[in-house]
Image: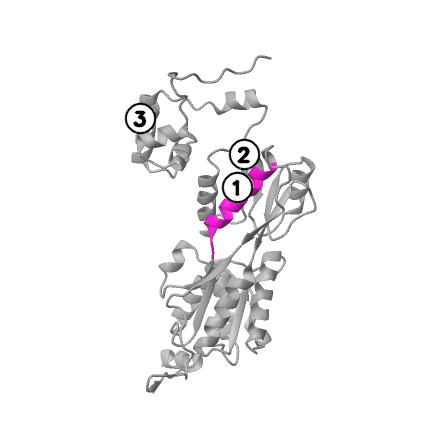
């Protein structure tokens, strides 16, 4: 077999996706989405991309590249809940890092479906998981430091004067939800707090689940002064119930979420939350997959750390009864509020 001749000086440079992006004055990701007919691409941007492709006479031949290399150079991304804004934001970040496509699957479901997992393992496909990793040479794990951000959240509440703390978890069959709840309990213990059992409620990481969980908490004889939620969708659901009940956030009760989705900054009040960067997750997932499939990496890294950090907004404040300046903030009970509305 003859070696492919090197490009000589003066020869025209072979065009690639970067040249199209530069010519169209858009990002490489936008060019990729346009070529792959992703419907969410802005129409005006897509027109510019196709115009540049035509003017540059660029032809994206991924099928021919696969025939020559013997590899499809495709990647997969499995997620568990498309209606949760966290995951579309993660998909966009993953695509941005994966323009030069690789073969492999990133399992970003925060929960493993066993039949699907067995099928992927049997095909010897490189995989990346969050939190839980099956024993396999072709698997890496994104290890999220939940304790780091959740501890910051609990310490933030403690500094404000809160000691009556509640936690709404996700579905406890998932390891990620077990880890988040465990991080909360350890962090509460550090400040000498042992939450009342009925204030520890299991949700399902949805808006509706957050609403149901908050309604259960409001049925308790004594209310917590602060609620930490296992994700932002749960927290937003909790905020809705509190608003309907007439309880003020944060004057009557403080709320903290987890994830820091884009929407968290725009709810009322803006949500204090623990940030888990989708950008960091996407970069680590792509890098982990690439380390498995590129021959330059003799040994793929098995664990990729992901940090978390508290983002303070307006949904947390002093608990009722704490002296602020020269005045004490009164607390209205749920029962009295209901009776007044009925009269």
Q: Quadrant of residue 193?
A: bottom right
Q: Residue sitting at 40 percent across and 17 percent down? A: 9
Please state which of residues 102 and 216 is positioned toward the viewer in this rendering: 102
x and y percentages locating residue 87 in the rendered image: 48, 49
Q: Can residue 203 be seen from the camera position used here?
A: no
Q: Earlier in the sequence, mark 1 or mark 3?
A: 3
Judge left or right: residue 293 versus residue 210: right
According to the picture, the residue beneath numbered tag 1 turns out to be 286
Where, quadrant-wise, is the N terminus in this rendering? top right
Please state which of residues 342 and 21 is positioned toward the viewer in this rendering: 21
Does dot 3 land on a helix, a strand or a loop? helix
Marks 1/3: CA–CA distance: 30 Å
Marks 3/2: CA–CA distance: 27 Å
The residue carrying pointer 1 sits among few (fewer than 14), some (14 to 19) or many (20 or more) residues within 10 Å by Cα, namely many
The residue carrying pointer 3 sits among few (fewer than 14), some (14 to 19) or many (20 or more) residues within 10 Å by Cα, namely some
Q: Are marks 2 and 1 in contact (CB under 8 Å)?
A: yes
Q: Of the numbered discs in the image, which one, if any, rests on residue 51?
A: 3
Predominant SS along the magenta part: helix
Residue 37 falls within the magenta-colored stretch = no
Q: Of the numbered discs in the image, which one, if any, rests on residue 102?
A: 2
Q: Earlier in the sequence, mark 2 or mark 1?
A: 2
Q: Earlier in the sequence, mark 3 or mark 2?
A: 3
Residue 279 falls within the magenta-colored stretch = yes
Q: Can residue 275 be seen from the camera position used here?
A: yes
Tell how many labels: 3
For the magenta stretch, what is the residue range?
276-292
Marks 2/1: CA–CA distance: 8 Å
Please state which of residues 241 and 199 is positioned toward the viewer in this rendering: 199
The residue carrying pointer 2 sits among few (fewer than 14), some (14 to 19) or many (20 or more) residues within 10 Å by Cα, namely many
């Amino acid at each position: 077999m003859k070696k492919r001749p090197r490009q000589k000086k003066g020869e025209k440079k072979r065009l690639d996706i970067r040249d199209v992006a530069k010519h169209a004055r858009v990002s490489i990701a936008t060019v990729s989405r346009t070529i792959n007919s992703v419907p969410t691409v802005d129409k005006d941007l897509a027109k510019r991309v196709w115009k540049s492709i035509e003017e540059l006479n660029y032809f994206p031949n991924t099928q021919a590249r696969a025939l020559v290399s013997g590899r499809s150079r495709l990647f997969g991304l499995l997620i568990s809940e498309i209606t949760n804004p966290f995951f579309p934001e993660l998909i966009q970040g993953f695509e941005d890092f994966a323009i030069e496509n690789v073969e492999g699957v990133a399992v970003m479901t925060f929960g493993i479906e066993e039949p699907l997992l067995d099928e992927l393992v049997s095909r010897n496909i490189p995989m990346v998981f969050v939190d839980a990793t099956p024993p396999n040479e072709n698997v890496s794990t994104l290890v999220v430091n939940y304790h780091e951000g959740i501890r910051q959240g609990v310490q933030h509440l403690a500094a404000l004067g809160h000691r009556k703390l509640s936690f709404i978890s996700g579905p406890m069959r998932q390891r990620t939800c077990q880890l988040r709840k465990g991080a909360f309990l350890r962090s509460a213990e550090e400040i000498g707090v042992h939450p009342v059992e009925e204030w520890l409620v299991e949700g399902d990481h949805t808006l509706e689940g957050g609403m149901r969980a908050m309604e259960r908490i409001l049925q308790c004889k004594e209310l917590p002064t602060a609620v930490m939620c296992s994700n932002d969708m749960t927290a937003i659901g909790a905020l809705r119930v509190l608003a309907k009940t007439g309880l003020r956030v944060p004057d009557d009760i403080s709320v903290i979420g987890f994830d820091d989705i884009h929407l968290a900054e725009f709810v009322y009040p803006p949500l204090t939350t623990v940030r888990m960067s989708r950008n960091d997750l996407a970069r680590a997932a792509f890098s982990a997959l690439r380390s498995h499939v590129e021959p330059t990496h003799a040994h793929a890294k098995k664990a990729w750390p992901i940090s978390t950090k508290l983002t303070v907004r307006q949904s947390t404040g002093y608990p009722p009864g704490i002296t602020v300046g020269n005045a004490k903030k009164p607390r209205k009970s749920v029962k009295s509020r209901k009776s007044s509305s009925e009269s």
